[in-house]
Image (cartoon, helix red, strand yellow):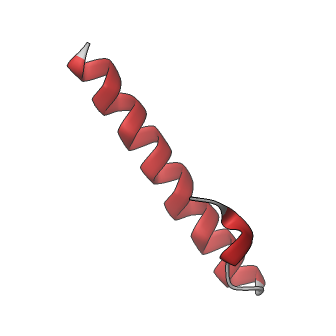
Amino acid sequence: MRQDRAIPTLMGHFGGNARWHAMLSESRQRRIAWQ
């Protein structure tokens, strides 16, 4: 899943980035919790 299809607007871009980083950190925490 890449950011290439992000909405080409500042709000859309930053909103997508925030959601993306939230998912990354969440999956990372889950991975650590599973270990």
Q: In the image, is residue 6 above or below residue 33?
A: below
Task: Locate residue 21 relative to residue 34 in the image: left or right.
Answer: right
Q: In the image, is residue 9 above or below residue 17?
A: below
* Percent position of residue 27, x then y: 37, 39
Quadrant of residue 26 within the rendered picture: top left
* Numbered marks: total: 0
The residue positioned 59% from the left and 70% from the top of the image is 16
Quadrant of residue 1 within the rendered picture: bottom right
Residue that sits furthest to the left in the current view:
34
Say which of 7 and 18 sits in front. Answer: 7
Say which of 31 and 14 sits in front. Answer: 31
Q: In the image, is residue 31 above or below residue 15?
A: above
Q: Quadrant of the C terminus?
A: top left
* Percent position of residue 14, x then y: 68, 70
Task: Locate residue 1 relative to residue 7 in the image: left or right.
Answer: left
* Percent position of residue 6, x then y: 67, 77
The residue positioned 57% from the left and 61% from the top of the image is 18
Say which of 9 and 6 sits in front. Answer: 6
Residue that sits furthest to the front in the current view:
1
Task: Locate residue 12 relative to residue 20 in the image: left or right.
Answer: right
The residue positioned 77% from the left and 85% from the top of the image is 8
* Percent position of residue 5, x then y: 68, 77
Task: Locate residue 11 relative to residue 34 in the image: left or right.
Answer: right
